[in-house]
Image (cartoon, rainbow, N blue to C red):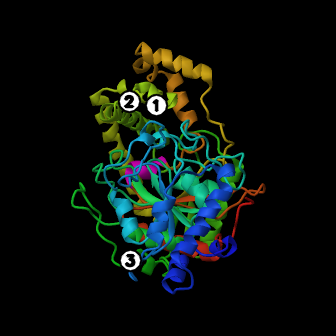
């Protein structure tokens, strides 16, 4: 199967070809592997390969009811464990350890018939919005290899945009599906809290803010993947009610005329690139032309406080992860990247009452967005505040690493984080991606839709955040937008 033919199909299309006997799963897999080989030196998107296992899997018989039977697939190298294979979380030392179990989401993908042949690049612990791990090197954007594909699902998005696979495993704890989707001209849906299991390793990820998912080139692939991924597990702490009908069966029904409130103001108060504003305004006009009520609104939540509360919990989580991994695998703190060590040091300076107060404020933010959704069905914003940044643009300078090391050694992070300088640093670190954390913190479904390209030819997605249990509505809106402004055939120059 030639790449020119392979790339013309989404995942459901490839599965149909295999099911009908028009092509074999082995032929399709060979096309995917060849594309991965061809683009690796330029993109560094796939950091681990399972070629032999994949060929064995592709040669086996698939069941007719398997939605994605024989479709090549890539896991994210974070929270998507596959028993017997490494899951490094972007860390060199962890790459030496094989997973003792298979994550629920991976098992469901396998049950649906995918052929896993690799794992994609991700920043260490998914801790950054750019994919530049020390262990594996930076991943690059197929639209401009000098630019980032975003993070933390950067390798997944780069792989899909480059045509290695039509859909890839991803996850989102603060925008990690939507940010890369926006950078690469792809569709990315983050499901609501409790919709997709994070087990069996964890009852929930990041206090329920993190969720697994996919990045795709077509809305129908994401809808069908939602049907595969969603649903409770016996070991889960809670669950969302099943949709009334499958997501795939519902996307071709136009959504009701929606009330859409839009705002481009940065939640952190930082500047927003005119191209990001233009992308949002373009989406608002398109939605209005489709008959939806579209209205400019003020920011519906306290953005600066939400950002602070998000990052405080994030830092504490990094501290917990490092401490647990040290115990489990005998690692040293120096086995982790300097920036992650700094995040963990800040987290260790947080007292239990402070952390509990922070989580209580999460509820305050949830109440604010719930009140907004009493008046509007959807909040529309840019997904990111500017086009994809250049690789290394947010890299911490060596001198700052040294200062951080000294401060950590003498235990001064507890004092430092209460200063205006630290608050300014927090705001600066989120300046490029200030819009996405709200949906994670409040547990709301959200998606990035690729409707806009800059005059320089760079993708710049827009974000829609729905109310509780609104995945069907978001997918219907996405499909309506996809029909009105198709993006599937837009291809990067690589």
- Residue numbers of the magenta segment: 437-443
The picture quadrant where one finds residue 444 is bottom left
Looking at the image, residue 376 sits to the left or right of residue 461; the answer is: left
Give SS at disc 2. Answer: loop
- Of tags 2 and 1, the one toward the viewer is 2
How many C-alpha atoms fall within 10 Å of the one at disc 3: few (<14), some, or many (≥20)?
some
Q: Which quadrant would the N terminus be assigned to in this image?
A: bottom right
Residue 78: mark in rendering: none
Tally of numbered tags: 3
Using the image as rendered, state which of residue 53 and residue 68 is in the foreground: 53
Q: Are marks 2 and 1 in contact (CB under 8 Å)?
A: yes
- Of tags 1 and 3, the one toward the viewer is 1
The answer to whether 11 is drawn above or below residue 97 in the figure is below
Q: Position of residue 232 (x, y in %)?
A: 27, 64
The answer to whether 435 is drawn above or below residue 169 in the figure is above
Using the image as rendered, state which of residue 275 and residue 85 is in the foreground: 85
Using the image as rendered, state which of residue 246 and residue 57 is in the foreground: 57
């Amino acid at each position: 199967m030639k790449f020119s033919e392979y790339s013309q199909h989404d995942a459901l299309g490839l599965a149909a070809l295999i099911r009908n006997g028009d092509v074999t799963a082995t032929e399709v897999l060979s096309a995917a592997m060849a594309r991965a080989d061809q683009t690796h030196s330029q993109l560094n998107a796939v950091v681990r390969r399972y070629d032999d296992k994949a060929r064995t899997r592709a040669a086996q018989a698939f069941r007719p009811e398997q939605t994605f039977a024989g479709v090549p697939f890539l896991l994210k190298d974070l929270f998507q464990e596959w028993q017997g294979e490494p899951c490094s979380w972007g860390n060199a030392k962890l790459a030496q350890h094989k997973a003792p179990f298979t994550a629920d989401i991976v098992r469901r993908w396998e049950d649906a018939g995918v052929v896993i042949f690799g794992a994609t690049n991700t920043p260490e612990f998914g801790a950054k919005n750019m994919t530049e791990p020390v262990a594996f090197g930076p991943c690059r954007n197929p639209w401009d290899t000098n630019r980032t594909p975003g993070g933390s699902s950067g390798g997944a998005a780069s792989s899909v945009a480059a045509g290695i696979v039509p859909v890839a495993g991803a996850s989102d704890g603060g925008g990690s599906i939507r940010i890369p989707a926006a950078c690469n001209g792809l569709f990315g849906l983050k499901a609501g809290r409790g919709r997709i299991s994070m087990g069996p390793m964890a009852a929930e990820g990041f206090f329920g803010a993190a969720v697994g998912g996919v990045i795709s080139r077509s809305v129908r692939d994401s809808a069908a993947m939602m049907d595969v991924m969603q649903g409770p597990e016996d070991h889960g702490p809670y669950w969302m009610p099943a949709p009334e009908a499958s997501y795939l069966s519902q996307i071709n029904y136009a959504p009701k005329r929606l009330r859409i409130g839009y705002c481009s103001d940065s939640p952190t108060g930082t500047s927003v690139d005119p191209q990001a504003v233009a992308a949002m305004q373009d989406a608002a006009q398109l939605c209005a032309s489709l008959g939806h009520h579209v209205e400019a609104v003020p920011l519906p939540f306290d953005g600066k406080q939400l950002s602070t509360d998000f990052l405080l919990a994030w830092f504490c989580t990094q501290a917990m992860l490092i401490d647990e991994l040290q115990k489990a695998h005998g690692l040293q703190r120096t086995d982790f990247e300097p920036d992650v060590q700094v995040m963990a040091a800040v987290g260790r300076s947080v007292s239990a009452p402070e952390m509990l107060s922070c989580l209580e404020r999460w509820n305050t933010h949830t109440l604010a967005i719930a009140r907004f959704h009493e008046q509007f069905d959807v909040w529309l914003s840019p997904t990111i505040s500017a086009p994809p940044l250049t690789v290394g643009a947010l890299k911490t300078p060596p001198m700052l690493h040294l200062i951080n090391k000294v401060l950590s050694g003498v235990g001064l992070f507890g004092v430092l984080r209460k200063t205006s300088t630290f608050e300014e640093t927090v705001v600066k670190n989120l300046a490029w991606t200030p819009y996405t954390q709200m949906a994670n913190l409040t547990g709301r479904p959200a998606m990035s839709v690729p409707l806009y390209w800059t005059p320089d030819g760079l993708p710049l997605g827009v974000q829609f955040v729905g109310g509780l249990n609104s995945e069907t509505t978001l997918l219907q809106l996405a499909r309506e937008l996809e029909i009105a402004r198709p993006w599937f055939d837009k291809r990067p120059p690589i």
